[in-house]
Image (cartoon, rainbow, N blue to C red):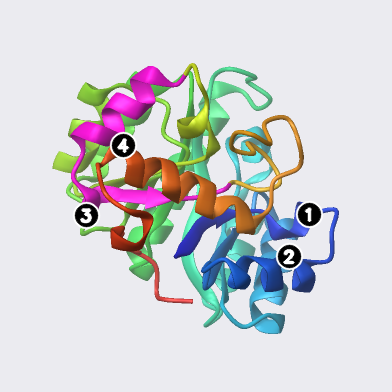
Amino acid sequence: MVDTHAHLDLLEEDVGEALRRAREVGVTGVITVGIDLHSSRTAVDLARTHPGVRAVVGVHPHEASSLDREALRRLRRLAGDPEVVGIGETGLDFYRNLSPRADQERAFRAQLELARELDLPVVVHDREAHSRTLDILEEYAPFADDLIMHCFSGDLAMARRVLEMGGFISVAGPVTFRNAGRLQELVRELPLERLLLETDCPFLSPHPFRGKPNSPQRLVLIARKVAELKGMRLEELRLPCPFARP
């Protein structure tokens, strides 16, 4: 199994120890994701240091106002590192609006264009911005299996539009929550070949660890729930990985 979205730089525990425990339960690879230039550089450093780790680099919508011309130039240079397998996380967050919406959209488009230029997958953050996110993505569609909707929170109709564009739906710890009926039904409906698993650690711990710091080893709890929803054993679960394999 590959944890397709983690923030290893934010773990309170030792990264090497966290990865060792993850391997013990079958998590063989981790994609560590940046949210700004500093954390993106750290992601690359972690990928260089730890076998089985690869980096995704980008600027989160909360930090979108920081992505000026010089920052974009630095991001492009960083994205050329051989440990980098994607651009992100980018997108729109209209829940907190920590950057003005115009800046978020500008940074989103800039990173979509960078991903296309470098032929890398793009990891999209979408919170309370479903309609506008889809509108912008459709400007760049179709995607060649290189669009990942991180920690998906939309409905089935939105998920189907993402799949039509050539994207993947990634699910995290919330799929295990008792009140996640809509998300669980979505997982039942979507084809396995378009589903990804992530922890988003140290956030979004799955049940029964909800509210506690998350780690890559807990990917197995998410995988077990997805297997249950699909009516199969965990050992039978085979999911894609759109990134270059860690």
**Vertical position of residue 150 compared to residue 99: above or below:** below
Q: Amino acid at mark 1?
A: Leu
Quick one: label 2 or label 4, which is nearer the N terminus? 2
Mark 1 near mark 2, Cβ–Cβ under 8 Å? yes
Mark 4 nearby-residue class (10 Å; few <14, some 14–19, many ≥20): some
Q: 38 or 28, which lies in front?
A: 28
Secondary structure at numbered mark 1: loop
Secondary structure at numbered mark 3: helix
Q: Is residue 243 left or right of residue 103?
A: left
Disc 3 target residue? 193
Q: Is residue 188 magenta?
A: yes
Quick one: label 1 or label 2, which is nearer the N terminus? 1
Quick one: label 4 or label 1, which is nearer the N terminus? 1
Q: 43 or 198, which lies in front?
A: 198
Q: 29 or 98, which lies in front?
A: 29
Mark pair 2, 3: CA separation: 28 Å
Q: Amino acid at mark 2?
A: Ala
Q: For marks 3 and 4, give the one nearer the viewer.
A: 4
Secondary structure at numbered mark 2: helix
Quick one: label 3 or label 4, which is nearer the N terminus? 3
Q: Amino acid at mark 4?
A: Leu
Disc 2 target residue? 18
Mark pair 4, 1: CA separation: 29 Å
Q: Amino acid at mark 3?
A: Glu
State the image coordinates of residue 239 (x, y, percent, origin top left). Answer: 31, 59
Region in magenta: 180-199
